[in-house]
Image (cartoon, rainbow, N blue to C red):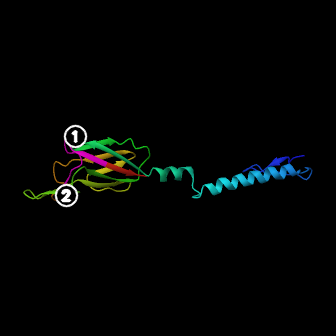
């Protein structure tokens, strides 16, 4: 007679003293052990499904067009909750200076859940950007929502 009980994880025979093991029971257990090891060896990284998903899609890219408002919230529709990212004006230097007025316009920012550069922030998957009407610090202006400009963001897990 086969085993009265099975092991919890992979279902091997677990005999009681009154059970009578048979050769077929041992062969079945060996087949289970072999296939379990084969699955384990095939997954050379030994990672969880969540880790695999994170590694296979570690970032999300998106764009928006500036509308000129001083503060704007953008639903990025990022499929995960990002921990950090970068925001930048397309086809622009990270910062530009108007030497006639000595104003410096920041076109590149870093966002994170803990802290961000001036002019950009993130909460969940909502990106908040600013377009300075007045200087934020000294002659520094945030330029993350200028009318008609294209902006890009890359968000990371």
Q: Which circle marks residue 67 in the picture?
A: 1
- Choose top left, top right, bottom left or bottom right for residue 44: bottom right
Residue plotted at (74% across, 54% down): 33
Mark 2 vs 1, N-terminal side? 1
> Percent position (x, y) of residue 28?
80, 49
Residue plotted at (19% across, 58% down): 137
Q: Which circle marks residue 154 in the picture?
A: none
Residue plotted at (48% across, 53% down): 55
Please name whichever residue, 30 or 146, is drawn nearer the observer in this view of the structure. Answer: 30
* Residue 150 shown left or right of residue 157 in the figure: left
Query: How many numbered circles does the render carry?
Result: 2
- Choose top left, top right, bottom left or bottom right for residue 108: bottom left
* Residue 94 shown left or right of residue 80 in the figure: left
The stretch drawn in magenta includes residue 51: no
Query: Vertically, is 155 above or below 99?
Result: above
> Percent position (x, y) of residue 34?
73, 54
Mark 2–mark 1 contact, CB under 8 Å?
no
* Residue 46 shown left or right of residue 77 in the figure: right
Q: Write the start and end of the magenta stretch as one range.
A: 140-152
Please name whichever residue, 31 or 86, is drawn nearer the observer in this view of the structure. Answer: 31
* Residue 135 shown left or right of residue 126 in the figure: left
Please name whichever residue, 96 or 111, is drawn nearer the observer in this view of the structure. Answer: 96
Query: In this figure, which residue is indicated by the disc labeled 2?
Result: 137
SS for dot 2:
loop
């Amino acid at each position: 007679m086969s085993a009265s009980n099975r092991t919890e994880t992979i279902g091997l025979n677990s005999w009681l003293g009154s059970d009578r093991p048979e050769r077929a029971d041992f062969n079945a257990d060996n087949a289970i052990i072999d296939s379990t090891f084969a699955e384990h060896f095939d997954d050379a990284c030994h990672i969880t499904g969540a880790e695999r998903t994170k590694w296979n899609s570690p970032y999300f890219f998106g764009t928006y067009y500036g509308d000129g408002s001083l503060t704007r919230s953008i639903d990025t529709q990022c499929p995960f909750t990002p921990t950090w990212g970068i925001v930048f004006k397309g086809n622009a230097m990270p910062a530009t200076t108007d030497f006639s007025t000595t104003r410096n316009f920041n076109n590149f920012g870093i966002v994170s859940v803990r802290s961000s550069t001036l002019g950009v922030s993130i909460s969940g998957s909502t990106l908040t950007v600013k377009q300075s009407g007045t200087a934020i610090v000294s002659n520094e202006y945030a330029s993350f929502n200028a009318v008609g400009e294209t902006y890009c963001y890359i968000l990371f897990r």
